[in-house]
Every structure is written in C-alpha cells, then in structure tokens.
Image: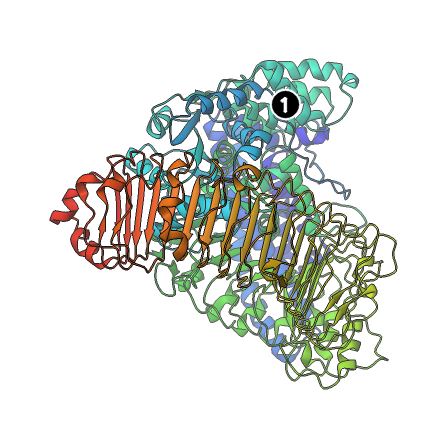
Amino acid sequence: MAGALVGGAFLSAFLQVAFDRLASRDFRDFFKGRKDIDGSLKKLKMLLRSAYVVLVDAEDNQYTNPDVKEWLDDLQDAVYDADDLLDEIALRCKLQAESQTGTSEVRNFITAFVDSFDKEIPFKLEKILADLDSIIDQMGILSLKKDIVGVKLSSPPSQTKTSCPATCDVIGRDMDKEEIFKLWQSDVASEICVVPIVGMGGIGKTTLAQFVFNDEKVKKSFDLKAWVCVSENFDNLEILKAISEGINGTASNFQYLQSLEMEIQKTLKGKKFFLVLDDVWNENYDVWDNFIKVFKCEAQEVKIIVTTRSEKVARVVTVSTHYFLNELSNEDCMKIFVHSAFGNRNLHEFPQLLEIGKEIVEKCRGLPLAAKTLGGSLRSNFNQNDWIKIWKSHIWDLPDAKTNIFPALRLSYHYIPSHLKRCFTYSSIFPKGYEFEKEELILLWMAEGLLQQPKEARRIELEEIGEEYFNDLVSRSFFQQSSKSKSCFLMHDLINDLAKSICGKFCFRLDESNESNEITKETRHLSYYKADIYSVKEFEIPLEAMEAKGLRTLLVKSHSPAWMFKDKNIVKMDLNLLQNFKFLRVLSLYGIGINKLPITIDNLVHLRYLNSCYTGIKDLPDSLCNLYNLQTLILSSDITKLPTNMSKLINLRHLDNSGAWMKEMPPQMGKMKNLRKLSVFGVGIHDDGSSIKELGELQHLSGKLSLLNLENVQCINKENTEVILKNKQDLSELELKWKHRHGAEDSEKERILLEQLCPCTNLNSLTITNYEGTSFPKWLGDSSFSKMVSIELSDCDNCFSLPPLGQLPDLKSLRIEYFGKILSVGLEFYGNTINPFRALEYLSFKNMPEWQEWVLLKGEVFTCLRELYIEDCPKLIGGLPVQLPSLTKLDICECKQLVASLPNSPALHQLLLSYTGKIEGGVYSILPFPPFASLSRLEICECPDLVSFPSGGLSAPNLSEIVISMCENLKSLPEGMHTLLPSLVRLDLGWCTELESFPEGGLPSSLESLAICRCEKLISRRMALGLQGLHSLKSFTISNYHNELESFPEEALLPPNLTDFTIGYLPNLKSLNGKGFQLLNSLKNLSIWNCHSLDCLLEDVLPTSLYQLQISCCCFLKERYGNEKGEGRVKIAHISRISIS
C-alpha cells in the first residue's frame, strides 16, 4: 500500500495502458518491416516515459503553480489523442487476425477499413509527436523533478473480494438527535412541524437526519415516512413523486401535480407522517408555500426535517426554532477517523500512527466528512511515512474561498491510487444528487478502459475488478449508499464538486439552465440529465461542442421515457451529429424520442457502450454488428428481434434486453462467448432446437435470464444429454416461460424439456410460467438447491401435484398460482425433511379452482412464515395451519367453502377476509377470533351472508383500523367496541345496508376517522349514533345516501373538534344546514362531490378556520363558484385553497 502514496499520480494509469499496448506482441508483429511507423512509435514511448517520471512532482505542484496545472492538462489532452490512435491500431490488429478466418464479405469490410486507416497512421502520429515534443520541452522551464524512488504504479486490488463496509454507528450526534425530538415536542400546537437542520457542507446534516429517520422512536411513532434528496432544483412534482414512492413502495405514474397532491393527501389521511427533505437550496417562499400546502390535510401528524446550508432557506421553511449543527469535537472526529482507517484492527498495535492521526484530525476542524474521507484514504495503510506526508502536506495551507473542507478532500483524493483517481473523476459526469447503481458505473468505467487488469497469471473478470474499485471508493467515503435504495449510491455534493474541479475542462455537464463551464476542444466527456419532465425541448448539442472532436462520452438521460408521453414532452436529438464524434466510447440515448439508429453507427469504431433504453427503437440496423469493440448493449423494450449477424459482436459482455419480448434469437449466438449478461432469450417459431443448444455455449452468463417461447423448442428426447443451463454457475435468477395455453401435444416432451433445463444449484430465484407437463422434474425441490430463496409457479394447468419444495432449506418466498387440476396439497409438497419450509416467510396460493384439501403436518412447519395469501380457491374446504408464530399478515379471499379456525398467530398485524368462509346462522365459520394482541388492521368485505360477529366481541387491544364493506346483511358490529378496542382510530363502513346502529356503549373514544357509505339505515338514525360525543374524531365522511335528505348536517350532529368533512353522492341534498356548521370551529378541509341538487354553500356560516375546499361533479356549485372572478367565488375568497371540477 505504500506505493499508493508514491505512485498515485492521476495520469500514471493512463500512461501505463499506453506502455502495455506498445509492448504487446500484436503491435510488434503489425509494424514489423514498417520502419517509419515503428520508429515513430518508439519515439512516442520515449516521450511518454519522459513525462511519466515527473508526474508525481507535477501533481504535487499543480495546486500552487497554474503553469504546472496547464502543463498537466496539455499532457492529458495529448495522452487522450495518443490513446485514441493506439486503440485504433489495436482494433486494426484484431480485425486483420479475424479476416484470416472470416467470410469474403467480412474480409472485404475489414480490408476497406484497414486500408483507409493505414493511410492515416503516419499523419496522426506526426501530430501527436509534435504536441508531445512541445510539452516535454516545457518540463525544464517548469523545473519539474523526476521521482527519486521511481514512479510505482500501485497495483489494483487482489482477487480476494471485499464487500462494502457496513455503515458505522453515528458518532457524536446523540445529543443533537435528542434536541430534534425536544423541538418536536415543543411544537405540538402546529399542524405541521418543520425543523431545519442548518450547517456547513460536510458537517453531518444528512447523517443526523438519517440518525433520526432510523431511530426506534420514529419507527414506532409514525405510520408512514419518506426521504427525498432535493438538491438544487426544487421541483414540486418530482419531490411529491418521490414522497409517493416512499410511502407507497412503488413508483408514481401521476403526470399532473394536482392529481398527485390529492393522492398523497388521501394516503396520509388519519396517519402520522415523517418526511426528510435533504439538501434544500430553495429560498423562494412562494415555491415552499405551494409545496407545504399538500400536507395541510387530514393527516393526524406531520413532522418534517429539512437539511440545508442556508439560513435563508431555514427562515423560508419555518419561523420557529432552527437547529444549527455544530462541528464535532476532536475526540469524536478521531473516532470516525480511526474507524475509517483501521476498521476492526487492534489499535494498540499502532501507537505512533494514532498520535499522527490526532494531528491530522485536528486539521479537519470538527468536520466528520473530512475525518471520514481522510481515514478512508489511509485505510489499511500502516506506513508511518505516508501518514506523515498527509499530516505535513502543503495542501492544508492552500486558500479556498468556498469551504474549508476542500483541503481535506483534496488530500483524500491526492493519496489514493491512480487507478481509483481515474474512476472517481469520471463520476463527475453525474449531476449532484444523482443516484446510480453499482453496475451502471462499472460498465461505464469498463467502456472507458479504466479497469486495469492486474499482472498475474490468472485473468480476473473486468466486472470483478470494477466491483473492487467501486467497493474501495465506498470504503474511502467517496461514494455513499442511498438512504432510499440499498442498490443505489451517490456522492456528497462536496465530493461531487471535488470530482468536477479535478476533471476540469475535460468533463462538461450540460444543465437545462445552461449554467456550466465552457465546452472546449479538450472536452472528452459530455452529459445531459433532463430532470423536469414537463420541459418541452429538443436536446441540442451546443455548437461549440462540434470542436470537441475527441469526445469519448455522450451520456444523455431523460427522466421522461419516450413511451410515457408518446410524442410530447420528451427529449429529442439529431443523431446525424454523431458523425462529429468518431472517438466515442460511451453513447447513452436513454429516454430520447428516437425510433431508429443511424445506419452509419458502425463509424463509431471505438464504441464500447450503447444504451437505447426507453426510446422508441424497434429495429436495429445490420451495421451495428460491425462495432467490434462493443461491450455493453442496452436495448429498448420494443425490440423483438436482433440483427442476423449479431454473433460478430464477439467482445459483447452485457446484452440487456430486459422487458423485451424476443420472438427469436439470431443464429450462432454460441460464438458470443464473452457474454456475461443476457436478459431475455426467445426461441423462434421455426427453431429446431439449435438455438437452445447455442445457449449452452454461453457459460459465463450471470444475473437474471428469461427463456421465452419454450413451446417452440423441437427435437426433444430423453437421450439428449447436452448441458444447457447447468454450467452457468453465476446465474442467480431464471425465468422459464411458455406461451399461455399453447396446447402441448405431448406433455411428456414438455417435462423432458424442463428436465434438460435444470440450472446450476447456485440459483437464487426461479419462475416457471405456462408449463403444460403433468408433473415436475426431480431437480425442482431437490435439497441441493441450497441457495434458492424465491420460487414462482404460475399457470401450470396440467400438473396434478406440487413438487417437494419444503426440502429447500433457504426458501423464503413461494407463489403458486393458476393450477387448474390440483385437488390436494399433500405430503409430497413438504418432501422428505424434518423441518419443511423452515425459512419460508411469504406464501401465496392463488386461482386454484379445484383445490379442496390442504394436508397439514404436525410439528414445526412454517415457523418463519410472515405473510400468507389464499385467493380465489372456491372449493377449498378446510385446513389452515394451526400455529404460525411469526405471521404478521393474513389475506383470505374468494374461498367461500372454507371451514377453519384462524391460526394462532400472536404477531398478526393485518387480517383481510373477503367472500370467505361458510356462514352458519349468520356467523362466520372461520370465527371466533382468537385473541390478537398485535392485530392493527381488520378488513372484511363481500360477505353477503354475514349477519353478526360472535358474541363477546373482538379482543384486539392494538386494533387501529376496521374496514367493513359490501356485507349487505350485516346487522350489528362487534360487541363492546368502546372497551375491547381502545386503540381504534379508523372505522370505514360501506354498503352495509342492514346495519342500523352502533353497539351498546358506542364507539371507542379514540376514534379519529369515521366513514359511512351506502348504509341507509345507519345514516337515517344518525342523530342517535352519538357522534358528537366522539371527542377525538377529526375526519367524517358520509356518502351514497339516496333517501330524502334536503338539508345537512343537523345541529349538534358532529363534534366541534372535526377538521375534515366529506359529503358525497347525496342526490337529494339541496342546502347546507348553517346551524350544523356553527360549532365546527376547527374545520380545515371540506370536500363535496356528486351532490347534483346542491346550489349554495351558505358562505356566511362556513367556519373561518376552513383552509381547503374541494368541489367535484356538483353542477350548480360549479356554475356558482367555478369562475375565479365571479360573484360567488368572491364570497369564498377567504378560503386559501379551492379546487372545483
């Protein structure tokens, strides 16, 4: 590791690549007998060597001497040019070798390319040598010194894999966290409590917010929480979409702000919600006010933490107390530094290093990011001289007007190995706040040639090297894991600034605001990330970019994929301009509105990475197959077939066609032996079995593989022993799919095919769909598949029994759906093992129309099961597991013959019963309920024969939500609700037309939300329900009442503490009762919909507290109040937020 500090010059790794190429046998053989070119290449090597030996001194002096910095930039520019030429020569060598064995067509293409290129070599070499001559001459003028020890290129990590270190415990912020909680408690009067955490960059604002976010108090106190990294662009729609994804678990498809706002308000209704807005820069109060209005809804509680560097931002988001975060003590900074530098090693072994470390930490000035990154740069390096170099470095004394963390970050960068420097600075192409996946960045590194093969006997896969580099940068705190997704990473804004400052003019990020540095002819990397999905513009490469003819990266990514808006609101691009950039290694057209690639795409001979994901491209030109260097190809999901000559792409490693329905695969796919990723493999309709055999040749496939159209495989017989999938040890997920209801003529052949598709036992996940064999092969369920964690079997209509899946020791998720001939799930399901399904956490049976019996084993079965779903199994008679100690969620739907007791599940949180269980005397056969101490949600729907609940009521002290709907004959609710359900906060009753009253004693005093929909008898007796006595009730909804109700609500019907009132579909309602509104002094939100006879709001009696009014499908009200400048609208102008549609 000591060599890392001596030989970590940024350009040394670039030059080493050039030296390796010039020394290769291919180069020597190619230029044998060409003395003119051979001599020029020797001179090139000599000039590069001359620069190589002064790199360390030049990099040390670039911060204090602008001339040295300019010299390094000139050298880097020249090295880029030289690398481009050497790359072309390397391609020429490979193509010449290929031409010896190729077809005449291939030979003609290669000959034309080689002849054209041979004529250009002398001219290009002459220019590069002239530039380098001039650069080397300046070394003396700048007094650059040769490294005395000799520049040592630090070798890349060994082949031993190291995982990313787990996030360490937060140090020194316990008191700060408690202060945040105190601020919350002191602001109980506010409907929305906003606490801004203010502090300089790198001081730990985000870390403190994460500390609070993950605290057990927060987990227990809030129903929903979300985290949004806002950064510089405060876009309401994007932020709310991120919030929606955080609270719902799925990406939001809303395209319009108002719809999204209403959906979020609906989700937050009656809930306690915690939100973190990280890294906010918006100082415009109106923008913030429009955003925060969304949370003035029916939520029970809203707490928001805002992290920012700006006090002005803090004043915008709240007028109450701000929390100013101070620097850490040197003692706490030392703890962070020690953890980053030493890991779990015994500190007593390094007393001298600890003393030096204290001196380094003192220079960090209490900034944890500085301590963490510096410690990471010294990780596992125990050379005392290297530590002293950092302590005594002149970089500490460099002036920096922006921030005093920069010297520490510069030092952290300065002393990392050169191969990591190249990879880190390349990431400056990402905008601030951008979250990237590990594989995404590694593939870009690979395309740019930044992954350095170690000089050892066994070659290591480039992807493995990239993972080592990535993990190393994470361990050094240059990358950090996203708080939203474990699979994503990002850079701290200051780290991003550092990368951009180092890359300088060689990297250009084109922002939509066009506020960026100037593009020059030296620019090699250009990116454009479109964040605002509503900005309608065509992506235009700036005119000055035409001068950047050496461009290597063109990374365009639109956040509004082309399919989302058809031909509207999408980024478009003129691909003819690509001809100006013939040295491109990376071309990303992600989300661009294009439908085809140019035929001349093969002119980009250096191209190694091509991304056309989320475009409208349906067909690929044949010329694509001439891109010999191509390593990564990411395709649009509209692609259904690949070019015929695809097998020519022998260097392709990643073919990502995920989401595409491939009708067939091109011939001779087996030649693409470097393939590591092939997402989808489709068997053609005329396939004779050859293509599936070709798949067997691709031994290095990894990740996920989907095999489609398996009904097209022919020539299947028992004697066939060819290995198709079993040799693919790195395959983790496998999907085997036949066409739905393809009508297999021979079910035995189908079973033999599935037998021959036996995967390697390393497989983690398996999905089988539309299989029409009558049984499964023996390998499915075999205990040798010890790493299998997920299985889905779907639409296997001919199978009479299930495989022995209980034998799989690590199986966690199992879905069994659409089995039309299964009568019994018997002993064969458990297999021959002592504790079947010992790791299973998720089990789903769905759409099994003939299933009648579930044979249950005694003893320890399903001991870890957390979620159980049984849906649409109409003939299932009896049998649910008796003991499910870990079960938290149980859904039983459309199982109308089921006669069984609910399992003993003390941890059960959610119970859904829908159209399930026989009714005996009007009482559920699946009841009575056992005591459920943890049950928090109960939903019963579509049970027309349910008349009443068992006597004695429900014993569920933590039950907070009850939803009962479409139980037309239900006459009474559970007894003793006011005492047995002390935690109930929400009660929804819908379409229970025979329900007449609440139970004796009324509803629990804890109730906060009550909705009554289409319960005519209950609504007609509303004055006897005792609603006014519900002092915690904040939200009340009444809808779908068709009887006479001309004026509503009556005086003294509702409690005065009501904040949210919804009136819906009361067709006979003609007026609001002013007396009913007089006491509602806390009302904030009033929603009225589908009240076609209502023509006036009685503006004078509406509470002054009313903040939001929503009117929908009320024609008379729309006519009276819809015009924003009309007389009626003026009378309600005091209401802050009005929506009429």
Q: Nearer the viewer, residue 739 or 325?
A: 739
Image spot of residue 876 (x, y percent)? 69, 67
Q: Nearer the viewer, residue 975 or 1?
A: 975
| Image position of 990 (left or right of 696) | left
Evaluate whether residue 131 shows in this view: no
* Relative vertical location of residue 275 with respect to residue 951 in this rendering, above or below: above
User: Dividing the image into 4 quarters, which one contains the C terminus?
Assistant: bottom left
Q: Nearer the viewer, residue 197 or 975?
A: 975
Q: Nearer the viewer, residue 365 or 851?
A: 851
- Measuring 33% from the left and 24% from the top, which residue is drawn there? 319
| Image position of 208 (left or right of 1060) | right
The residue pinned by badge 1 equals 336
| Image position of 184 (left or right of 23) | left
Image spot of residue 971 (x, y percent)? 50, 55
Report how many numbered discs are placed on residues in the image: 1
Image spot of residue 473 (x, y percent)? 62, 37
* Relative vertical location of residue 152 with respect to residue 247 in this rendering, above or below: above
Which amino acid is tagged 1?
Ile
Evaluate whether residue 989 shows in this view: yes
Image spot of residue 208 (x, y percent)? 53, 27
User: Dividing the image into 4 quarters, which one contains the N terminus?
Assistant: top right
* Relative vertical location of residue 744 with respect to residue 519 in this rendering, above or below: below
Q: Secondary structure at mark 1?
A: helix
Which residue in the rendered view is the most extreme toward the bottom?
A: 745
